[in-house]
Structures are given as C-alpha cells and as structure tokens.
Amino acid sequence: MANNTKGLSRRDFLRGGAAAGVVGAGLLGGGVALDAKPAAQAAVAGVVGPGAVPMAFQINGETLKATLEPRVTLLDALRDHLDLTGAKKVCDRGTCGACTVILDGKTVYSCSVLAIEAQGRPIQTVEGLGRPDKLHPLQAAFVEHDAQQCGFCTPGFVMAAKALLDVNPQPTLDEVHHGLSGNFCRCGTYAGMRKAVLQAANPANPANPEPEERGAGGKGKGKKKHKGGHHG
C-alpha cells in the first residue's frame, strides 16, 4: 500500500535551510552589515585602537597629554612619554612595588594599569611631592634615616608611605608594616623606612626607635648606627 504521507526530503530540507539563511542575513542587514556591525558596536561601546589615540591625564594637579596605543601601561606612559621617571620599571609584573603611584587616592602598581584606564582620574607621582631644594617632609625623613641605598625602590616606598599617611596620619608601627607590605627592597633598608614614616607622622619625636633596637626593658640601650651605614 502506497504511503500518502509526505515526508521532508533532503532537497526540501536544504531549500528550507537556504531560505532561512537568506532571511537571517536580511535580519542582520546582509553581508555588508555583518562586516560593519562589530565596528558599529565598538563605536557605541567606546572601543579604540589598536592604533594610537589621544589621551589626557591629571597628574600632580596638571593636565598632561600624549598619543598612545591602548595597550600602553600607565608606567610606560609616565616614563617614556610624559618624562616622569620617578616610578621605576623593575619586575614589570606587579610584585615589587617600585612603580607605585597613587591613583584615586589609593596605591597601584602602575605597571599593571593601562594608561587609557587612568584618564581623568587624579594621579600622584613622586615628582609631585617636593623638589630637591624643598623636600616633602616624608622625603626629608627618608634622607634623615638613610632609608635608601640603590634608590630603585625608594620612589615606590615614598608613595606607599604617602598614601598611608593620607588616610592614617598617626599610624602605629604595625600599621606602617602593613602599609609598606606591598613593596620590596632588595637592599633591606626596611628599618630606616619605618623610622622615616613614623618621623613624618610625628615630627616632634624624630627618634622613633624600632623595638628590636631597644635594650632590655625598652630603655634605648641599643647601639647607635652611624649615618651612611648599611641598614641590612
């Protein structure tokens, strides 16, 4: 007995698929629109690049401009394009803290922030703190306590200390430890740095001896270190 039920043949299926493809292409705007749509979406979303684009930064109270590729980090923008070389490029992977700057009032590793993301946000670098003839109290305290040796990590530590004192003007020793814990000094001048931060927080008490430098009973019987000596 003949089967009168009409089934879907392979040819019918292919024809239907082709028609659906044409309709789908029409809904998406056709072949040309398919190519143009990502570009249109990018424009709406504010996507730029990969070529260089103009950027403007608020650094140390000034507006600085540069034309950079979107992939450029804030560290490279500062050092290579804006002539602000205080932040140092050491590990370049967000582990040592030598490139620390203050962004929106918080410390960041500038090697791990894209310059394009930092636009329009207040940025502080070590260059904005003081001048050689008029040091910021924190910088002066670093000098007073020999809190630097090779100097590569020093700007990052100064900025980390500045951010700490901005939010906590009278930190305890433990709080200083914590505030500087994101920075690494290969020369080992941590004791001098901690003293410097405590002195900047309380200039009336410039000694601020470390607990380990006090004699038994905390009477200050530890040996006095000569200036210029190695704080290892």
Image (tube, rainbow, N blue to C red):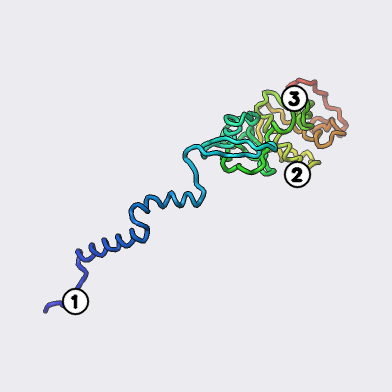
Instruction: Find residue 135 and report its image quarter.
Output: top right
Residue at point 85%, 33% (across, down): 203
Q: Residue at x 35, y 52 (%)?
A: 32
Number of the front mark, 2 or 3: 3
- Helix, strand or loop at label 2? It is helix
Q: CA distance from mark 1 to mark 2?
A: 82 Å
**CA gap, disc 3 and disc 1:** 96 Å
Tell me where residue 23 sits by quadrant. bottom left
Image check: 212 left or right of 82? right
Question: Which residue carries the number 3 mark?
Answer: 132
Q: Amino acid at mark 1?
A: Thr
Residue 118, position as x, y percentages in the image: 60, 42
124 or 225, which lies in front?
124
Q: Which mark is residue 167?
A: 2
Three-letter amino acid code at disc 3?
Pro
Q: Quadrant of residue 57?
A: top right
Q: CA distance from mark 2 to mark 3?
A: 26 Å
Instruction: Count the numbered circles shown.
Output: 3
Q: Is residue 174 visible?
A: no
Circle number at residue 183: none
Q: Nearer the viewer, residue 16 or 41?
A: 41
Q: Is residue 168 left or right of residue 123?
A: right
- Disc 1 marks which residue? 5
Observer-nearest residue: 121 or 226?
121
Dot 1 lies on which element? loop
User: Which is closer to the viewer, label 3 or label 1?
Assistant: 3
- Relative to the observer, which residue lies in front, 203 or 172? 203
Which badge, 3 or 1, comes first in the chain's sequence?
1
Specify the amino acid type for callout 2: Val
Q: Residue at x 74, y 40 (%)?
A: 164
